[in-house]
Image (cartoon, coloured by chain):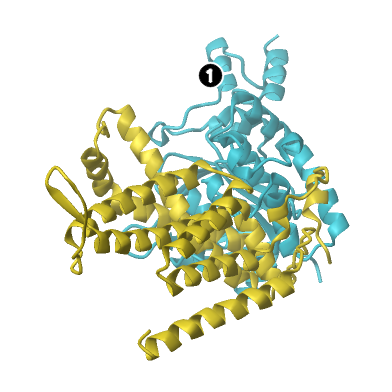
Chain colours: A yellow, B cyan
Amino acid sequence: MMTDQTLISGAPRVKLKWYQVIDPITKLLLILDMTLLSFASTNLLLQAGLILVATLLLLFSKLSSTTFKALGFSLFLIGTMLIIQGLFYSRNQTVLFSVLGVSFYKEGLIYATTLGCRVLVIILTSGFFMVTTSISENAAYLELSGLSYKTVYVLMSVCYILPEMMRNMRKIQQAQKVRGTNPQKTLIQKLKSVLPVLIPLVIKTLDQSMARSISLQLRGFDNPNRTVRTSQRVYRLSRTLHIGLTGLAILLIGWKIWSKINGL
Amino acid sequence: MVEDKRIVIENLTTRYPGTEQPQLRQINAEVHTGQVVGIIGNSHSGKSTLCRVLAGVIPKIVSAEIEGDWHMLGRRVSDGWRAYNAMTGVVLQNPAGQLSGLADTVADEIAFDLINQGMAEGLIQKRVVEVATQMGLIEQLNLRPESLSGGQIQRLAIATAIAANPAVLIMDDPTSEMDPLGRRQFFQWLAQVKETNVFIVTSEIDDLCEVGDVVWVLNEGQMVAQGRPGEVFNHLAADWQIPAPTIQQLAQKMDWHLADGRYPVNDAELKEARYVHN
C-alpha cells in the first residue's frame, strides 16, 4: 500500500530540483567513481577537473555551513600538508622557490597537491550527497530496495551517531562557556576543552541511542505488518545510472589492479 | 469467555542488575477500565520503573529481576510481546528520545507508528490529522521535528503514543517541558479521554486532582497510598514530602470541609465544600 507522506503532511506539490530526481544510490556511486578516478591518476589537470565538477555539483545544489566548515578544515589540513611535504618529502630534489632562506621542493609540493586534491574531491562529493539527501530519504529508498527496516535503521543509526555527538558537544561547550569555564579563544584551549568531556559525551550518545532503540521497539518498528513506504519521489534514469556508474567503478578498480601488477 | 478489563499488579518487586535495593517493593494494585491513574512520589521513588514494567520495557527490552506478577486487560508480556505492545502507548521521560529520527516532518513522525502497524494509507492520513488536532500540532505538521520547542516535542511524543488508539496509555512526566498554556490544554484533553486506561507520572498535583480517578503514591519503591485523589491527599504523611493541592491548602486555611470531614482537592469538591460551609 502506498503511503504518500506529502499527502499526509498536506504539503503543496512543488517542482523538484535536479538533484532531487537523482536517487541516493546513484549519488553514493558518484562519490565512489569520483574518488576512484582521483586515485587512478596523479595528473593534476585531471584532479583539477574533478574538483571543478564536484564544486559545480555543490554550487548548483545547496550550500550549507557544515560543508563550508568541512571545506575550511580540509583546506587548513592541505595547507599544513603542503608546507610539510614541500620541506621534508623524502624524494625532494628540485628547489622550486625559497622563502626567508627556507627552500620548498617541487616533488614534495606536487605530492601534497595531489593528496590535497584527492581529499577535496572526497569532501566535495560527500558534501553534495549530504546536502541533497536527507536521512529519511535514504532510509525510505533502502527499504524500497528490499532491505529490512531493521537493517536500514541500523545503517541510519550509524549515520546519526556523529551529528548527535556534535550536537551534544555543542550543548556541553555552551554550558561551559556560560559558566566561564571554557574560554575557547585559542586552538589549544579548544582542544583542551574537548578532552575532558569525551567519555561523558560518548556515554551520553550511547544512552540516547539506547533510549531511541527502546522507543522504536515500543513503537513497533519491527512489526511484520509494516507498510513499505513508497516514496512519491520520482527518480530519473536510476537503473541506467546505476549500471553505468557501477561499470565505471569496476573498470577503474580493474585498471588500478592491472597497473599495479604491471608496475605502471 | 468473559473479557478481563482490569489491570492487576500482584506483589511486584523489581530490581535492576547491579543494584542492592529493589526499585519497586511488593506493589499491589488493581485498576478498572477507563480510569486515569496518577502516579506521584519524589525522585527515585520508583515511578519511572513502574511505568517501564507496565509498558513491558522491563523485562522485554531492559533486563531486571522481577518477582510477583502483573497483567493488563488479561494479557501478560510473556503471552506475546507484539500483542501486549500493540495494546499500549508509551510516552517516555525524555520526549526527544522517543522520536524515530527518520522523519522529515511532524506528520511523518506521527505516521511512523501507523505505518508500522500496516494501516491503510487513507486511514493513516485521517488519523494523523485527528491526532495532530488533538495535540494542537496541526500547524506544525509540515515542520521538521527537530525544529519544535521542548513542549511541542512532548506533544508530538504524546501524539505518537496515541496515534494507534492504544487501550492503555502510559506517560512518564509528559508535561515537564510544556508552558502553562500547553499544560492546561493537555490536562483538558486528558479529561476528555474515555475508555482508555491512563497511567500518568506527574508533579502537577492540582491538575491531577481535576482529572485523576485514582492516585498512587510511591515512596522508596513502595506504594504507600492509593485511592481517590480526595482520600489520598487528605491522608498524606509528612515524611512522603508531597505537597497538598492548592485547593486543599486554601480550604484548610478557610476551614471549608466536605460533609465527611475531608478537605476538597478539586474545583467540584471546593464548590461542594463551600455549599456545606454556607
Report whether residue B32 is seen: no
Q: Nearer the viewer, residue B176 or A121?
A: A121
The one nearer the camera, B137 or B74, is B137
If the image is split into quadrants, where does the N terminus of chain B sit? bottom right
Could you say where residue A126 lies in the image, as x and y percent from the top left? 51, 58
Q: Dot 1: few (<14), some (14–19), or many (≥20) neighbours within 10 Å?
A: some
Q: Is residue B168 visible?
A: yes
The residue marked by circle 1 belongs to what chain?
B
What residue lies at 31% left-to-right and 64% top-to-bottom? A111
Q: In x, y percent, where is residue B108?
A: 71, 51
Question: In the visual, does A92 lie left or right of A43?
Answer: left
Residue A186's place in the image compared with A222, above or below, is above
Camera-side residue of B59 and A219: A219
Q: Residue furthest left?
A: A101
User: Mark 1 sits on what residue?
Assistant: B249
**Which quadrant of the view contains residue A248?**
bottom right
Q: Position of residue A164 (x, y in %)?
A: 46, 51
Image quadrant holding the C terminus of chain B, namely top right
